[in-house]
Amino acid sequence: MSEVGIDDISIYFPRLYFDMKDFADFRGADFSKLNKGLGLSAMAIPDVHEDTATMGANAASRLIDRNGIDPSSIGRVYLGTESALDGAKPTATYIMDMLEQRYSPRFGGDCFRNCDVVDLTFACIGAVDAMHNTLDWVARGGIEEDRIGIVVFADNAKYDLGSSGEYTQGAGGGAILIRHNPRLLAIPDIWGVSTMPVHDFFKPRREVETRKIIENVLDLAMESGEKIKDGLAEKILKLLPTSSKKDELIFENEKLMIHKDMPVFDGQFSNRCYSESVKTAFIDFRAKAIRDGRYDPETDEILTEQWKRIIVHLPYAFQGKRMFPDVFRHDRRHLPMWDEIVKEIGPEPFPDDYPDTPDGIEEFEKANDQYRRLISKTIQFKDFAESRIEKTQRASSLIGNQYTGSIFLALMSTMESDYLDDVDMTGKRVGLCGYGSGAKAKVFEGVVQDGWTDVVSRFSLFDRLSGRHPIDKSEYESLHRGSRKVSVLTPHEEFALVGIGADGDLEGQRRYAWFD
């Protein structure tokens, strides 16, 4: 049977970045903690003309050009994102619009007409879901049909100014070519899954009372010294939110809906959900691998030793080595080496050791967090992380969080690093662990193919990262707030947003163009 998997990957990141040292100085933060403790060196920041759709389209265009693909042969473009531009219209359609603009002169105006597009959203695991779905679709078509699918990921990982998540920001897009007999990575159809409904990170539909907005505006006006006619403020407030008299109607809604890119989150709780989800998905993967005859626990080396590299979702560069101790522990409890670790750091905590009460559960979680940190400091785990995880962190350190794309950025980072180090990865297995808040994890594996060096040699990931443009704190804040109206850098050889709701367009309608 023909294998399916990743034939090529393209990555796009903004040309602007905010250096982490400058960020630390700006916020009065400890740069050493951010850099040495979390692995952060810089964060990618979108320019005025960049958004979710442009970043995805630029990556997809790069992939199409590099592989000489006829757009009419692409059966689907599935987008994984948690930064959608509309509540109904898929952001993938904006990407298709841009691709049609660029390729229709050469391939015809209907070159994407028979392509299926959709958005998939489940926080940071949306692109893994899109890839899982597309792998199944390609495989179902058979080698004779030779289906081609492109999975796109694009996000702007944006947090409130001054919040505890601000330093993890980043942005970017990417595109993954899925087909039979892939040159880069074959992906067997064994997937470990863990899903649990939690509120560790989410973007709620926010509401604010119209009255409260007007009260705040009036208060600010008076504080700034603006003169308000006697009785005008009282008259306005009396008319809010509506009046029964038609001629006195001022505001249609009692509450206004507000969209914010920035999430509500509990960082410590989210770390626990991440760790628990990946561990549970790993257990599910292991059970399925045994069932399918892929793995024999009696004779085969443990799974995490079989995986030459371990690629995980990285909301910040060092998240992988901070969260993976739970899987490391589960996969080694039955081995003699675990006895040595217990001698060094003591016995692990178990839920049964604590009262089955809210306080008892919280006490266990704190003890388990501490034990995970102790595992991460052992020489056994440090050696493991250095050999299997370290290379995945390098690009993340320079870009920051890419939400749905973080796991694939980590994959590109380790593969290009191995290529540059002249490491022979052909035939080696790699483990991949995706996570999305809310929460879901998927564990799967890939087998590096014979043609991987030809593909990776064209990534140029680190060369491109070295050519970016730094911004200062005033540029950073104006871009974050959306107050800057002119791009820091003029668009060049890329798609760009050129207008929203312009003359002749519907409200909120977005327009894009290709710039040579």
Image: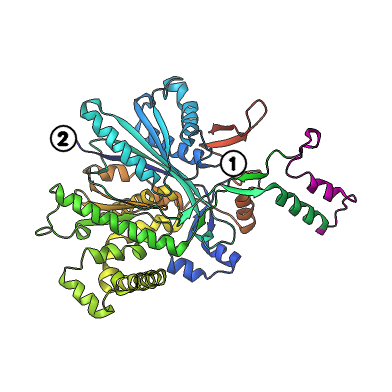
176 versus 339 height, above or below: above
Task: Identify the residue at image location x=74%, y=41%.
Answer: 242
- Residue stretch in magenta: 223-250
Q: Quadrant of residue 184?
A: top left
Instruction: Say which residue label 1 marks.
Output: 490
The majority secondary structure of the magenta stretch comes to loop
Question: Within 10 angstroms of label 1, few (less than 14), some, or many (20 or more) residues?
Answer: few
Question: Within 10 angstroms of label 2, few (less than 14), some, or many (20 or more) residues?
Answer: few
- Residue 305, given in percent of the width and then of the height, sits at 20, 60
Task: Identify the residue at image location x=55%, y=37%.
Answer: 496
Distance of label 1 from label 2 (alpha carbons) = 49 Å
Amino acid on which disc 1 is placed: Thr
Residue 294 relative to residue 24: left or right? left
- Residue 356, given in percent of the width and then of the height, sits at 35, 69
- Residue 333, given in percent of the width and then of the height, sits at 20, 68
Where residue 1 is drawn, which disc sits there? Answer: 2
Q: Quick one: SS at disc 2?
A: loop
Residue 28 part of the magenta segment: no
Task: Identify the residue at image location x=27%, y=45%.
Answer: 453
Name the quarter where the N terminus is drawn.
top left
482 versus 505 height, above or below: below
Residue 203 relative to residue 372: left or right? right
